[in-house]
Amino acid sequence: MKKFISIIFTLFILALLYSCTSTTDTEPSLSEDEINKKISQHLQKFTIEQKVGQMMMPEYNSVSAQEIKTYNIGSVIFGAGQHPNANHIVWANRYNNLQRAALSSPTAIPLLFGIDAVHGHNAVRGATLFPHLIGLGAANDPELMEKIGYITAKEMARTGINWNFSPSVAVVQNVQWGRTYESLGEHPELQSALTYNYVKGLQKENRLATAKHFLGDGGTNLRDNSGGPWSIDQGNVSISYEDLYDIHLPGYLEAIKADVGAIMVSYSSFQGIKMHENIELITGLLKETLEFKGIVVSDYDGIKQIPNKNYYHQLVAAVNAGIDVLMEPHTWKEAHGHIVNAVKKGDIPLERIDDAVSRILRIKYKLGLFDNPLVKIDGRPLSTEEHRLVAREAVRKSLVLLKNENNLLPLSKTSNVLLLGPGIDNLALQNGGWTVRWQGAESGDVIEGTTIREAFQEVSEGRVYTDLNDASKADVVVLVLAETPYAEGWGDNGYLDICFGLENQGSYTAHPDNLQAIEDALATRLPIVVILLAGRPMIVTDFIDDWDSFVMAWLPGSEGGLGIADCIFGDYDFTGKLPVTWPKTRFQLGETVLKENYNEKDYLFPYGYGLSYK
Ligand code: BGC
């Protein structure tokens, strides 16, 4: 109880601080008073239909330019993977075309455009792709977070897109969860340390960041015991309020301190109540206690998951709970009609609608969107050498050295290396989900970057072989194992064996070629360095004794090859530390450092583990 009171006290202090220190990086040309005046002028002129239009977020493919004008639409989402393989010029033209439609409407309110730029501007061809968040949790470097955020914002600005559905501040409590790599780690000290700087960086260049998914997304119970897809994601969080606040809130407190513009609601439930209808936590905690002044946005079609209600009542519950922007990408028109009716019938108070529209307009003014709504088309490449160097630094810092028998690493630059395994030459595996497409790129060819093979050839002065027949000419095997790309519940996996389908248990996220590659490496009788490209720990207990060195590389992104080569050949030391506990057996999955009686000896590697050369 004492702990609970101290949390409430901390929340209160933070709320006070927030109300005194709310700033943006680029000061808007209008003062807060002037913005408020403009907002009330708009509210006086808007019809109910136009107000509700501002709250709608259709998918780009599901709305026409004419509908944007007729409905006074407030924002548009570029849904993950729905617009693949286009470069920044194509994206900038899409942006300008629709923005012009909004500006030529009777209200002339500019649009917000939302996208998931969760490890760089990852849907856009030619973007700099950073390690996914789990790797940045291993790096645990606040300044680096700000740089990465800033570069992401800069690359977004080149396409016009002004609203990023990032960062996830999820605190993963179970590495079987398919969104583990979207989390900085299992202990909220990581979200506390890194979120503020990341949000500051992401919101430079007049972009808007989104802390997600409010609240408790990383703490869901198993939904079923299949261990298959969707067996964890979007489930129920059954912990106490005290634990909810202790574990899952710190990231939001930091995001709010950094003046984050938006917060996205989680698909999950808390104590059996879907977060999308949780008025106590959205309006009570977030808007009233924490005085969050930005936009609360629903998750993609999330409102439809509110149980036991028809669509009309689901929408009423969500809006009354405090949701301001409705990400109902393909049913926005129906949603619009229902909400207008609900206001007319008195099921949703007009003040609630005015609150939502005020928040949306305030953000648009703060972003300077009324002054600078269009993007200048600029043909120069999106990524720059400077951006790539930061990504390479992030890769180096994210790597965790877990084993190094007889100091096999660093390799001498003159050693001859045999590269084996599915990950040696594959940018799709290096980048994982949320890259080009929602579930990851269909092939590495659509991503610009450097593979491990290419990087080894660039950095090493010895020979780099990739054919098992050349084993006799090599001094060492570097074996690159991998998880196949996935996103969200498609990646839920109760059997995280490093080998696909081991013991008929179907570890379907392990790459199917891992087992053969492990056997090939052993057959060479050379010393073995294993590098793992994966979004989370995998069960390696039966194999690790045969490996001399073992490096966890997470999902390192476009510069993954170069960053890995930097450390393997000793130009830089390893500094990364495990942001999640590494289980010994599948029966330990779902356990974290926050569990009572956590005994680090029970695990293969505890939270915080990581070796260096020195
Ligand atoms: C995910 C969110 C994401 C949204 C928009 C949802 O499926 O849960 O994290 O921001 O889609 O793409």
Image: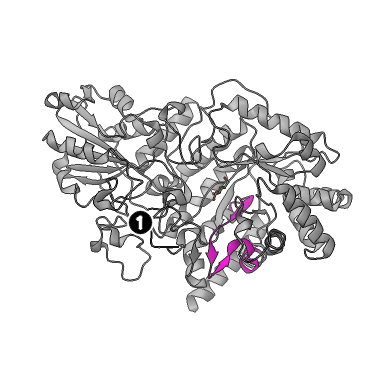
Q: Say whether residue 27 is visible.
A: no
Residue 528 lies in what quarter of the image?
top left
Q: Is residue 129 left or right of residue 527?
A: right
- Confirm whether the magenta stretch covers residue 259: yes
In the image: residue 248, left or right of residue 115 = left
Residue drawn at 65 percent across, 41 percent down = 59
Q: In this view, does 228 lie above or below 165?
A: below
Q: Residue at x 86, y 50 (%)?
A: 47
Q: In this view, does 197 lie above or below 10?
A: above
Residue at the disc numbered 1: 494
Observer able to see residue 536: yes
Estimate the x, y position of residue 343 in percent, counting from the top left.
81, 60
Image: magenta residue range: 257-282
Quadrant containing the C terminus in the rendered view = top left
Within-10-Å neighbours for mark 1: few <14, some 14–19, many 20+:
many
Farthest residue, direction bottom: 1
Q: Is residue 57 magenta?
A: no
- Residue 90 percent location from the top left of the image: 62, 26
Q: Which residue is drawn at 69% across and 52% down?
A: 325
Q: Residue at x 56, y 26 (%)?
A: 87
Does residue 557 sit above or below 208 in this rendering? above
